Image (cartoon, grey):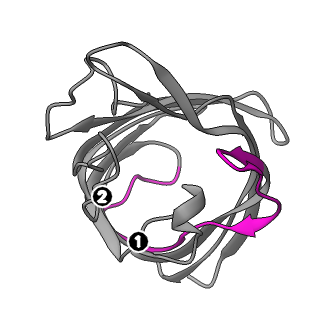
Amino acid sequence: QGAFFAGGLLEYAKSPLVLQDPNTGTREIMLDNVLAANLSAGITAHERLRIDLLTPLFLASTGPAGGQGVGLGDFRVSVMGAALLPGRNAGWGLAVVPWLDLPTGVQKEFLGQRAVAGGGLLAATREWTRFTATANLGVELNPKVDSRNLENSDVLVAGIGGAYVVNDEIGVGLEARGDIPFARAEVRGTGSPW
């Protein structure tokens, strides 16, 4: 209780949003060369309740009209409520994580939603002395978009990961996360980032 954190993750994405005509196969890059610092902070209000604040700070990106400059993305507030806590050195953990996304990003530059979004997931962990395995499953509810063939479907969110503590200063982790849209895309394989 009372513990807090702040962090940042630098991210680069090459052509994360490409429109493709399902009939001709013609492709148009709508968002390219995205460089962002994903900023986060949180505080543990109670041993079973953590509150997190997250936002991407876009340092550079390119849209259909050229360079888009620096700007904030959508602001996320999430709460993790732990139903089961692992022991001091090992054990199982289970938590519910709802979140709310506020539309603070620039939608016309494809750097934010046009309305409030949100979702929630169930997160599980199994901890051993030096190794931790995690998995989560949930739903993300997105505002509808009607821009060419973009619909911005609600998605099933899934993730899995593992981490190993090498010593008191170093840990190594690997994780995967994906979105599976509930609406079928016109172009097979699109709308499912992993």
Q: Secondary structure at mark 1?
A: loop
Q: Is residue 132 above or below residue 122?
A: above
Q: Is residue 122 left or right of residue 110?
A: left
Q: Position of residue 107 (x, y in %)?
A: 52, 65
* Amino acid type, callout 1: Arg
Residue appearing at x 36%, y 59% in the figure: 85
User: Which residue is at a point 82% across and 60% down the rendered structure image?
Assistant: 69
Foreground pick, 171 / 113 = 113
On the image, the x and y values in percent for residue 52 come to: 54, 73
Name, please, the residue furthest toward the front.
24
Question: Where residue 163 sits in the image (x, y, percent)?
Answer: 59, 31
- Badge 2 or badge 1: first in the primary sequence: 1
Give the residue number, with chain letter if any, for mark 2: 145
Along the line of sight, which residue is nearer the eye, 101 or 127? 101
Task: Establish if 164 lies above or below 139.
Answer: above
Classify 10 Å Cα crowding around label 2: few (below 14), some (14-19), many (20 and above): some
Q: How many marks?
A: 2
Which segment is the magenta one? Answer: 61-88
**Mark 2–mark 1 contact, CB under 8 Å?**
yes
**Quarter of the rendering containing residue 8:** bottom right
x 44%, y 17%: residue: 26
From mark 2 to mark 1, how far is it between C-alphas?
A: 8 Å
Q: Is residue 80 magenta?
A: yes
Q: Which residue is mark 1?
A: 114
Question: Which residue sits furthest top?
Answer: 24
- Quick check: can you spot residue 74? yes
